[in-house]
Amino acid sequence: MTSKPLLVGAVAYTPNVVPIWEGMRDYFTGSEAEMDFVLFSNYARQVDALVDGHIDIAWNTNLAWVRSVLRTDGGCRALAMRDTDLTFSTVFVTRPGSGLRDITDLKGRRLALGSRDSAQAAILPIHFLRGAGLGESDVELLRIDSDLGKHGDTGRSELDAIRAVLDDRADAAALGITTWEAIGRDELMPGALELFWQSPTYCHCNFTALETLGADRTDPWVAHLLTMNWDNPEHRRILELEGLRRWTLPDLAGYASLFDAVKQQEIPAQW
């Protein structure tokens, strides 16, 4: 008896999401682990759907992964992630000549943060400030909640943080490394901003499933996912849209800093 297709959830944070997941569905068609997909408007709805058993697998941000673990008391598994998810980081950027050379130089200065549900642009920056001995009373924070629900996926709040620096409403901005490399520099005149601090690496997205979904369902799906090949033009089209060169098995140690940050900042498991 053939199993019904696995239902994978993803958040529609950009129009590119539709061709990505149509391509993924086509790639799995005819395999031992066929799939279909459903799109959500935000990660809270997606995590609810996973926990309630309405979807089999969720394409989660790191915060959505943390919340899935907390909501299920650890009763979920990370199945796979992108190569680019293994070495994510946060960067602090500023205008040339600001005098900022290290994270500790932010004492008494103004820092623009992205949406409060963005791990890379809000939650972890606060965590890294505290690790450097700076409390929220030491740094004036400008919080920009312009894409709530998407966990910073759109990059909009990070671009707004960049604008705050350029408009002299902030001395520095916290950004995810992908925003700085792929968006931030392209939006600016050359030399308008410079990076002055970069965090240790951490992990970002992963495919999450509940432990109640057996390995007999997930193992063939993961195995087929991992065979996507950059040298195959049809595969490359999907990989490029999703921002990776290869899929890989997860590194759970890469989420430790975010688990610590969520606990220390008393961020709720549900919003």
Image: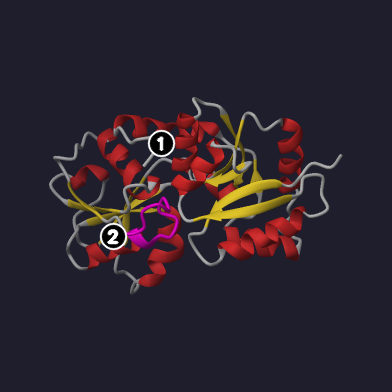
Q: Earlier in the sequence, mark 2 or mark 1?
A: 2
The magenta-colored residue range is 146-157
**Residue type at tag 2:** Ala
In terms of depth relative to the viewer, which is nearer, 191 or 255? 255
In terms of depth relative to the viewer, which is nearer, 190 or 257? 257
Q: Quadrant of the N terminus?
A: top right
Q: Would residue 210 be counted in the magenta stretch? A: no
Q: Is residue 203 visible?
A: no
Q: CA distance from mark 2 to mark 1?
A: 21 Å
In terms of depth relative to the viewer, which is nearer, 202 or 269? 269
**265 relative position to 29: left or right:** left
SS for dot 2? helix
Q: Would residue 152 be counted in the magenta stretch? A: yes
**Residue type at tag 1:** Leu
- Asked which quadrant contains residue 77, the reply is top right
Q: Residues within 10 Å of mark 2 (few under 14, many from 20)?
A: many
**83 relative position to 32: left or right:** left
**Up/down of 198 relative to 237, above or below:** above
* Residue depicted at 51% across the width and 59% down the height: 12
Way the structure is coloured? secondary structure
Residue 119 percent coordinates (x, y): 39, 45
Q: Main secondary structure of the magenta part?
A: loop
Residue 13 percent coordinates (x, y): 48, 60
Q: Please give the label number shown on residue 258.
A: 1
Q: Quadrant of the C terminus?
A: top left
* Residue depicted at 32% across the width and 69% down the height: 191
Q: Residues within 10 Å of mark 1 (few under 14, many from 20)?
A: many
SS for dot 1? helix
Residue pointed to by mark 2: 161
Residue 123 percent coordinates (x, y): 33, 42
Furthest residue in direction bottom, as rendered:
189
Residue 10 percent coordinates (x, y): 56, 52
